[in-house]
C-alpha cells in the first residue's frame, strides 16, 4: 500500500479547493511519496490516523499484529505482535500514544 502526501515540512492535509488547484500542477500530479514497510503478510484489517495526524495505526492478521507509521519520516515507527486477533482498536482518550485493543477472545488495554 502507498499513500500520496504533499508535505515538505511535515504532513498537512490539503483542503478540497487546494486539491482542485493542484490537479493543474504537473509537478504535483507526478509526485508520489511512499510509506516504508506499509505491508502485512496476509491482510490489513483496520487503519486509523492519530488525532494530531502524525501517525497511522494499522492492524492485520496471520500473525495478529499492529504497526505504527510516522508520517513525518514516511517510515514505520514500530510493530507489535499479539496472541489474539484484533477485532478493533482505538487511540486512547487519555493519551494519544496509547492504543486500546478489542481482541477476539477478550478486551485488553
Image (cartoon, grey):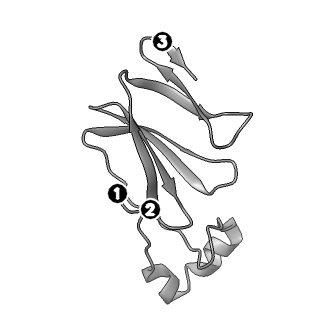
In the rendered image, residue 39, in percent from the top left (x then y), is placed at 32, 51
Q: Mark 2 near mark 1, Cβ–Cβ under 8 Å? A: yes
> Which quadrant of the view contains residue 109?
top right
Residue matched to label 2 = 75
In the rendered image, residue 88, in percent from the top left (x then y), is placed at 51, 27
Considering the image in quadrants, where does the N terminus appear?
A: bottom left
Residue drawn at x 56%, y 66% as measured from the top left:
72
> Which quadrant of the view contains residue 61?
top left
Kind of element beneath mark 1? loop
Residue matched to label 1 = 37
- Mark earlier in primary sequence (2, 1): 1
Q: Is residue 55 above or below residue 46?
A: below
Residue drawn at x 35%, y 23% as measured from the top left:
83
How busy is the neighbourhood of tag 2: few (under 14 within 10 Å), some, or many (20 plus)?
A: some
Residue matched to label 3 = 106
**Gap in angstroms between the C-alphas marked 1 and 3:** 29 Å
Question: In the drawing, does residue 46 fall left or right of residue 96?
Answer: left
Q: Is residue 3 above or below residue 31?
A: above
Amino acid at each position: 500500500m502507498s499513500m500520496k502526501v504533499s508535505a515538505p515540512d511535515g504532513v498537512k492535509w490539503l483542503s478540497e479547493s487546494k486539491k482542485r488547484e493542484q490537479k493543474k500542477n504537473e509537478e504535483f500530479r507526478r509526485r508520489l511519496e511512499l510509506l516504508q514497510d506499509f505491508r502485512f503478510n496476509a491482510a490489513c484489517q483496520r487503519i486509523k490516523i492519530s488525532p494530531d495526524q502524525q501517525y497511522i495505526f494499522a492492524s492485520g492478521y496471520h500473525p495478529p499484529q499492529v504497526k505504527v507509521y510516522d508520517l513525518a519520516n514516511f517510515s514505520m515507527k514500530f510493530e507489535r505482535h499479539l496472541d489474539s486477533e484484533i477485532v478493533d482498536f482505538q487511540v486512547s482518550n487519555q493519551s494519544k500514544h496509547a492504543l486500546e485493543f478489542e481482541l477476539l477472545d477478550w478486551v485488553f488495554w
